[in-house]
Image: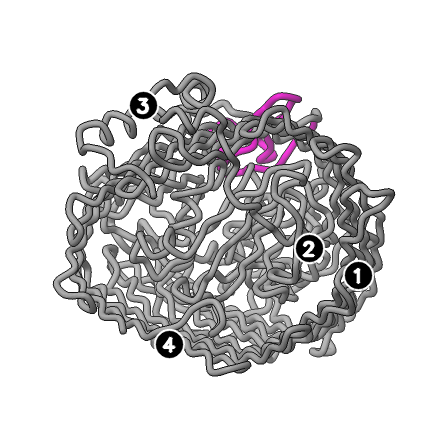
Amino acid sequence: MARKLPLKTALMLAAALAPLSFSAALAQDGAAPADANVVALPEVDVISTSPLAGAGGEDRFSFPSQVHTVDAPAFERTRSPSVTDALQQRVPGVTVIDVNGNPFSQDLTYRGFEASPLQGTPQGLAVYQNGMRVNEAFGDTVNWDLIPPQAIARTDIFTANPIFGLNALGGAVSIEMKNGFNWQGFEAQILGGSYGRVTGYFQYGKQIDNFSLYVTADTAHEGGWRYFSPSTLVRAYGDLGYRTQDAEVHFIASGATSNLGVIGPTPVNLLSQSLNSIFTFPQTTQNDMGSIALTGKFDINKNWQIASNFYMRTFRQKHSDGNDADLGGCDDPNDGLLCLDEDNFPAITNPNAFVVLNNHTGQAIPFTDGVVYGTIDRTETHSTTAGVTLQATDNEKIFDHANYFTFGGSVDRGFFNFASTSTLGAIQANLHVVPTGTFAGSNAILQTAGDLGYVPTYLNGTTTYYGIYALDTFNITPEFAATAGARFNIANINTEDTSGLNSELTSASNFNRINPVFGLTYKILPWLSAYGGYSEANRAPTPLELDCANPLRPCLLENSLVSDPPLQQVVSHTIEAGLRGAANNVLGGQINWKAGYFHTESTNDIISLASTVTGRGYYSNVPATLRQGVEASIEYHSGDLMAYANYALVDATYRFSAELASPNNPFADAAGNVFVTPGDHIPGIPRQTAKFGLEYNFTSKFKAGADVLIVGSQYYVGDNSNLNPQLPLYWTANIHASYQVTENIQVFGLVNNLFNNRNATYGAFFDTTTNAQIANGTPLTDPRTLTPLAPVSLYAGVKVNF
C-alpha cells in the first residue's frame, strides 16, 4: 500500500517535476524503505501495435518508438464533451488549434501533423475507433465531435508505426472504447455554466455470466462566447459482448448528430472593437453519423490468436458559409453585367477571359448598383464506408527466446457523393449574408462563364484501400529486443462527374507502397530502457485534393472542385530514439517518464495554398518538409497525489527553394507569391509547448487540481517565408475541485482559463479589399485574422453513480 504524503511534501514534489531530476531520484532516493532498494517495474503494460485495439499486444517497453496513453480518468478530469481537450492536456507534442472557432470541432496537431475536421486541411494522422477507420472517405477529415469521451477506455497515440496504414505520416490515434466486461455500474452527470453550456450523460455497464452490456448517451449545448455561434450535439454508443474461455465477440453500434457554429478567425480591426466579433456569417456545419461493427478475438491455442473487425459507417455533412464575394460591375465589353474582379485572377490567365456571372440556367446576371454582394456557399458530403480487418498473432518462443508476431490484412471501401453550390446574396451591416432581396440575381446559383470561379459541382466516387502487414518483435536477450515489419498499402480512388457539365472531374487514380519499420529496445536497468528505430509511411491524395490542384482553376475549399494536374502521394521517413522508464515505490508512489528525439522528413508533401481569387485555394505537392524535435514527459501517482509535466519542441520547416502562392501576405510580390528557402518554418505549427498539472486528495471526500498549458509562438498561416511577426505565445490555467457528498453523489466545479488570457490560438491573412467593410463601415486595413482564446469560464455539476 502506498505511503500517504503530507500535503506540503506533495506540493513541493509536484513543483519539482522534471525528467532529469526524477531520473536522479530513481537512482538515489534515500527516503525509500530498506526493503525497496531494488526498484521494481510495475505490471507489464500491454499495447496493441496494430489498428485492432484490445486484440492482444506486446509490452510497451519492447516497441521501438513512443506510445502515449491517455486513460479514462484523464478524460473524466476535464469534464469536457470534447475528446481533444484531454489529449492536449496529457500528451506532449499534441496541440489543439481552434481554427473553426468552436470548442467541439478543433484541429488536433501532433508533431506538426494534423487530424482536422476542416475540409481543406492536409491530414497526416490515422485515427481508429475500436479498429474502425474514422478518417472520412472524401477528405480524410476527423470529426472529433462524433466521439463521446465518457465511453473511452483508453487512447494510444503511436509514432513511427506504418502498420496503421494510410495517413500515419506523423502517427496514429487508436481509441479503445468501454464495454460491459471492463466497466460495470451506472453513472450520470449533468453540468452547466458559462455561455449557456449545458451537458449531460449517462453510462451503464453490466456483466451477467458470459454476456456483457455497455450503453451510454450524452448531449451538449452551448450558446457560444462569440456572436452567432451556438452548437448542439447528441451522441449514443452501445456494446453487447459475449465471451468464453477461448473467445470474445462484441456487437457495437453508435450514432451522433451535431450542429456546430464554426465562425472561424476574425479580422483584427473587428476584434479591436470586441473580442466577440465575427466576420461574415452564417457559418454552420451539421454532422450526422451512424455505425455498426462486429469485433472478435479467438484463441486457437495457448500461443495463437485470431482477431477480426467488420464494420459499416455512414456519414453526412452539410456546411453553409456566408462569404464576401469579389464581385462588381463588368468593364467593357460587358457593361451592365455582374463580373468577378479581373484583377484577382492568376497573372497568366488570359486577360480577355470571360468573368461574367451566370445563374444556373446560363443567363448573365445584371449588375445592381448599391448592393454589397456576398454568397452563401453550401456543400453536402455523404459517404458510406465498409471495412474488414483480419489479424493473427503468435507469442510462441523461438529457440527459447520471447517473440511476438503479428500479421494481417484490411480492406476499407468507401462510397461518397459531394455537391456544392454558391448562391448570390447581399452582405448586411452586421455582416450577415442574406441570400434574398430585390436585386437582380438574388438567390441565384452561380456559375462563372468559362468555369473560372463559381462552378456548381456534383460528384460521386469510391475509395478502396487495401493493406497487408506483418510485425515481429524478437527478444535477443531478456533485455534486448529487435522489431521489424512492413505494411503494403494500395489506394484506388475513382471520381465521376454526375452533372454532365464537368466531365474532366471523372478520373481514376491508383497509389501503392511498401512501408518498412524496424528498431531496437534495450532495458539498461529495471527502471530505464532505451529505444531507437526507423519507419516510413505514406498518404494517398484524397478525392478532394485530387480534384483541386490547379492554380489556374482554384477551388473554394469545402465548396468547388475543378479539373487538375495529378498529385503524388506523400511519403514520410522517421528516425526516432529516446529513453523511458517506469517504477513503483519511488517516493511512496509510481512514476512513468519518457524523453526522446524524432526526425520526420516528408517527400512530395501536400500543402494548401491560397489563390489570388478571393476565398479560393488549391493543393500542391512540394519537394520536402521536415518535422523534428524532442518530447519529454513524466507522471507521478501516489495514494493522494497525481502530477504530470510535459514538454515538446517541434521544429517544422520547408526543405526546398521555390515560390509559393500567398496573395494576402503583406510581403507577397505583384503576382501574389512569396519565396521559400530551406529552413523557413511551416506556418500554424507552434514551436514549443509545455504542460503541467496536479490533483491532490485533501481529504477522503475532497480533491482539487490545476492544469497549465503553455503554447509557444507560431507563424501566421500564409507566412511561408517567415517575414511577418509571429503569433505570440499564449497560456491558460484551469482549476477543478470535487466533493463526495455521499458514496453515490459527487458535486464538482471547474474554471477554465482562470486568468482570462485572450491571446490567439490561430492566425491567418485575408484580402483587405473585401466588400464586407463597405457594408459594415469598419475599415479593414490589417490583413491579419485571429481566433482568440475563449474567455474565463465557470462550470458546476453533479455526478451520481451506483
Which mark lies nearer to you, 4 or 1? 4
For the question of whether residue 651 can be seen, the reply is: no
Q: CA–CA distance between discs 1 and 2?
A: 9 Å
Q: Quadrant of the N terminus?
A: top left
Q: From the viewer's perspective, is the residue at label 2 or at label 4 nearer?
A: 4
Mark before the other along the chain sequence, 1 or 2: 2
> What residue do we see at 46% from left, 49% from top?
70
Task: Give residue 794's position: percent from left, percent from top.
Answer: 16, 53
Which residue is under mark 2?
50
| Residue 786 visible, this orientation | yes
- Per the image, the residue denoted by label 3 is 16
Of residues 224 and 311, which is closer to you in this image? 311
- Could you say whether the residue bearing mark 3 is in a helix, strand or loop? loop
N-terminal of the two: label 3 or label 1? 3
The residue that appears at 21% across and 45% down in the rendered structure is 697
> Marks 3 and 1, how far apart in space?
45 Å
What mark, if any, has residue 408 been given in the picture?
1
Q: Callout 4, which amino acid?
A: Tyr
The magenta-colored residue range is 658-685
Asked if the residue under mark 2 is in contact with the one under mark 1, i.e. CB atoms within 8 Å, the reply is yes
Q: Residues within 10 Å of mark 4 (few under 14, many from 20)?
A: many
Which residue sits furthest right?
Answer: 399
**Magenta stretch mostly in which secondary structure?**
loop
Lower sequence index among marks 4 and 1? 4
* Label 2 or label 4, whichever comes before in sequence order: 2
Where residue 414 sits: x, y (%)?
A: 70, 72
Res. 736 mark: none
